[in-house]
Image (tube, rainbow, N blue to C red):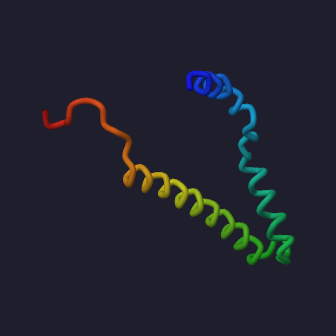
Amino acid sequence: MRCRWVAIIAAAPLLGCTMPPQETPAEALARRQVSCSEAGFQKDTPDFRLCVLLQQTNERLENVERRLGWIENEVRFPPPYVGRPYWW
């Protein structure tokens, strides 16, 4: 059991190295524009701008839903409270 914890603690710093770098706003915009172009929208048209805007909105909604999922899990399965209750 102790060896397992030692291995987990030793591997923890390496997990940060496997994360890809965060996407910049310019890269995100370019990715959305390519996606809209592949969907058949012509660049510099209102429909193209609406497509890019909808993709950005959908990404934000996905992030909000992911965060709400984490919050729901925290409420459903709260961590154990250690210490005195606040009313003491």
**Residue shown at 53%/58% (left/top)?**
64
**Residue shown at 85%/77% (left/top)?**
40
Q: Nearer the viewer, residue 48 or 73?
A: 73
Q: Nearer the viewer, residue 82 or 20?
A: 82
Q: Nearer the viewer, residue 7 or 69?
A: 7
Snapshot quadrant of residue 18: top right
Q: Nearer the viewer, residue 44 or 24?
A: 24
Q: Is residue 82 above or below residue 69?
A: above
Snapshot quadrant of residue 42: bottom right
Q: Is residue 76 above or below residue 87?
A: below
Snapshot quadrant of residue 20: top right
**Residue shown at 75%/77% (left/top)?**
47
Decide if residue 7 is on the left or right side of residue 74: right
Q: Is residue 31 above or below residue 1?
A: below
User: Quadrant location of the C terminus?
Assistant: top left
Counting labels gives: 0
Farthest residue, direction front: 1
Q: Can you give x and y, in whole percent of width and height, for residue 1 in the image?
A: 56, 26
Q: Can you give x and y, in whole percent of width and height, for residue 81 in the image?
A: 31, 37
Q: Can you give x and y, in whole percent of width and height, for residue 86 in the image?
A: 19, 36
Q: Is residue 30 above or below residue 48?
A: above
Farthest residue, direction left: 88
**Residue shown at 80%/64% (left/top)?**
33
